[in-house]
Amino acid sequence: MALLIRARLVAVGVLLAAFAAPARAQSPLVLSETESLDFDRPEAWGMKYYTSLGLLTSLGVPERKAKGQLDFGLEGGHVPQLSDEERRLGFNGTSLENVNRTSVFGRLRASVGLGQGLALELGYTPPIELGGAKPHFFSLALGRPFQLSDTWRLGVRGYGQIGKIQGDITCSADEVAAGDDIERNPFLCVQPSKDVIHQNVLGLELVAGHDGRSRFKPYVGLLASYMDLEFDVNALYSSGDVEDHTVQLTNGTTLSATAGLTYAAGERWRLTAEVFYAWLSIVRPPAPSSNNEGLLNARVFVAYRIH
């Protein structure tokens, strides 16, 4: 119901701006509803899609680190670009959202042995703007390997992540530049929005890998992630008649899988390439039931053993 009211208010605001601009009220209409969304709503799908991109996967065969053993590395990944149909996320899948910002992402990573086979991993994405979006994430994981045979190991990891992405998603700079062109600027945005996606994640990963005499070490993994997500709208549209501060909340669990190969270049250097896939359900109206529109991307990791 809140979404329907919001859509009607926006439509009224657009009509007021188009046909009654000289008589516009001095104060804009302020929208400040808090909406709880089903986890397979189009807006929720968008949030979990971009949250899945940043999950802290193992990126390697689980190994038993000595206490104090320290690795440092750089992770990079591909960000798939969504089609126009996939970008119809706002207003329950009817509004085209400006989410294609960058085709790459990066993260600094470090891991340290704690003793008793335990290893602590840390990940950090600094707030560097790419294509109009500014991510800022902290991630950590605690894991332990279990020897299945002389060359096969199973790893168990618990991981968590907190962070946010800022960007002009509701009202893009391109839409603002279009002015009163209703086709290119359908909501008559007057300035780029300052929207924020907040992400809180807890998860568990199982990783199995082969570590024999070869420098090439394959592995596969399975992840279950609980996501608590929030999208804060901060937009001014309808030629200034509507100020939107809607908050959308959603939460749920996703499943993901990985497959990768590590190349041990020497005693200290290693290079890993990984394919990641997340199953993501979505109900796109007028479809009556959910379908899977998953995320598939590739990641690379270069690590150096300092100590």
Image (cartoon, rainbow, N blue to C red):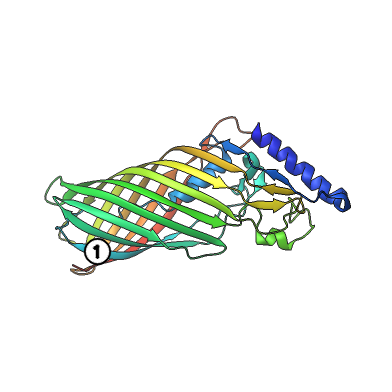
**Does 216 sit left or right of 175 as displayed?**
left
What percent of the width, then of the height, locates residue 24? 83, 50
Q: Relative to residue 182, is residue 253 depicted above or below?
A: above
Residue at the extreme front: 26
Q: Relative to residue 298, is residue 25 depicted above or below?
A: above
Mark 1 secondary-structure assignment: strand
Q: Quadrant of the N terminus?
A: top right
Residue 223 visible in rendering: no
Q: Quadrant of the C terminus?
A: bottom left
Residue that mark 1 sits on: 71
**Does 58 sit left or right of 49 as displayed?**
left
In this view, the residue in front, 198 or 223, is 198
Q: Relative to residue 69, is residue 246 depicted above or below?
A: above
What percent of the width, then of the height, locates residue 35? 58, 37
Q: Residue at x 42, y 46 (%)?
A: 200
Please give the count of numbered marks on the rendered protein.
1
What percent of the width, then of the height, locates residue 95? 66, 46
Q: Residue at x 75, y 61 (%)?
A: 178
Q: Residue at x 29, y 49 (%)?
A: 220
Residue 42 visible in rendering: yes
Q: Label 1 is placed on what type of residue?
A: Asp
Q: Residues within 10 Å of mark 1 (few under 14, many from 20)?
A: some
What percent of the width, then of the height, locates residue 271? 29, 65
Q: Residue at x 45, y 58 (%)?
A: 136
